[in-house]
Amino acid sequence: MNLGEYLRDRAPVLLLNAAALLVLSVFLLLTGNTETAVFLIVFVWISVAVVWFLTDWFFRRRYFRELMSVLNDLDRRYLISEVMKPSRRTEDRLYWEILRKSNRSVIEKIRELEDGQREYKEYIEGWIHEVKTPVAAIRLICENHREEYTGRIQYELDELENEVEKVLYYVRMEQVYRDYLIRPVNLREIVLSAISGQKRRLIQCGMQIGLDMEDIVVSTDEKWMEFILKQIFSNSMEYRRPEGARLRIYVRNGQQQKFLILEDNGPGIPPEDRDRIFEKGFTGKNGRKYNNRATGMGLYLCSRLCEKLGIGISCESEQGVYTRMILIFPDSDHNRIGGNRTGGRAENGEKKSAERGETAAARKRTPENVSECAEQSCENERLL
């Protein structure tokens, strides 16, 4: 509140004072008082009025500044009436009481909505756990009665489970702290687990995966991270090339950061859509062109979960060439597994070197095309 606003608000009182002063001056002059006496009375009147209005403006301004400061510090600003100091003015106290009653009604309504939302989420979680039982039963039947069509059924079951997982993680997203455990984990193992969980879909889509990363330790929750990776895999499979679809996974080290990069050779993202791909429900031109069933929820969930886990996520793309999803992990105290742990145990040095050599040789023998590994795994299951 500045002085001009205050004076405009007090304009009726100021006009009343001016009119009263004018009438008094005319009356005093008509009754034979000297001009000096009248001038002195007018001067005293104006001086008292100026002091009064300036003092009142100063205290009113300070009161509202303190009130705005309290309001700005509140996370839930609708609770302002519960923490504000009552004013000395009767008018302000009446407004305060009206505000309190109104806010209490708002708080009660918010509590009702929160209770309803919590019950709905609990119901959805219960439904998700219930629906997993028949899905597991159908999968078991397919495993025990292998026919030509059972592979297609299992593929559709994978799609169904992926959508059910989306719903579950969306419901739990606002309360992720109840179900996560941040600890040092092997990022390569999480990636391999996510690939294994999607192997049937990868084979069905003809997607080749090039895995080029060593054992890297990062601090995160492995279950939530695996879900994020599966959603990125799913996006790559939905928007893939008709032939020669490929997804390359590798790690780059930055300054106190590690970058997990998932790069596919799909159609890419149009420049006008790149800044909006993490928005809720956004499907863009690719969603309309390649996948009419797209919901725009996969990358939105990835973005929100990464935010909850303290992980950065970004996207780079060139239309018609590639799409590169980048997960940014803050560097932890554990840089590498096995090879970088050299804590003064010289007597075991040769043994560890030999083990690392065997691990490297085994990794060289690993096929670059993970789809081939998945096919071999499925063939072994049929033999069993």
Image (cartoon, rainbow, N blue to C red):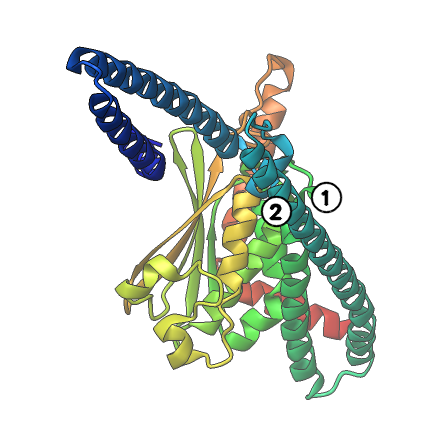
- Asked where in the image residue 92 lies, by quadrant, the reply is top right
Left or right: 333, with 65 as reference point: right
Left or right: 170, with 45 as reference point: right
Q: Nearer the viewer, mark 2 or mark 1?
A: 1
Q: Which residue is mark 2?
A: 189
Crowding at dot 1, Cα within 10 Å, few <14 / some 14-19 / many 20+, comes out as few
Residue beneath the point at 63% across and 74% down? 159
Give whichever of 187, 167 is nearer the camera. Answer: 167
| Residue type at the position of mark 2 | Glu
Give whichever of 30, 152 is nearer the camera. Answer: 30
Q: Which residue is mark 1?
A: 178
From where the camera sits, is residue 179 visible?
yes
Q: Position of residue 158 (x, y in %)?
A: 66, 72
Residue beneath the point at 72% across and 51% down? 108
Give whichever of 274, 142 is nearer the camera. Answer: 274
Residue beneath the point at 56% across and 27% down? 87
Vertical order, 109 against 296 (above or below): above
Left or right: 52, with 81 as reference point: left
Cα separation between marks 2 and 1: 24 Å
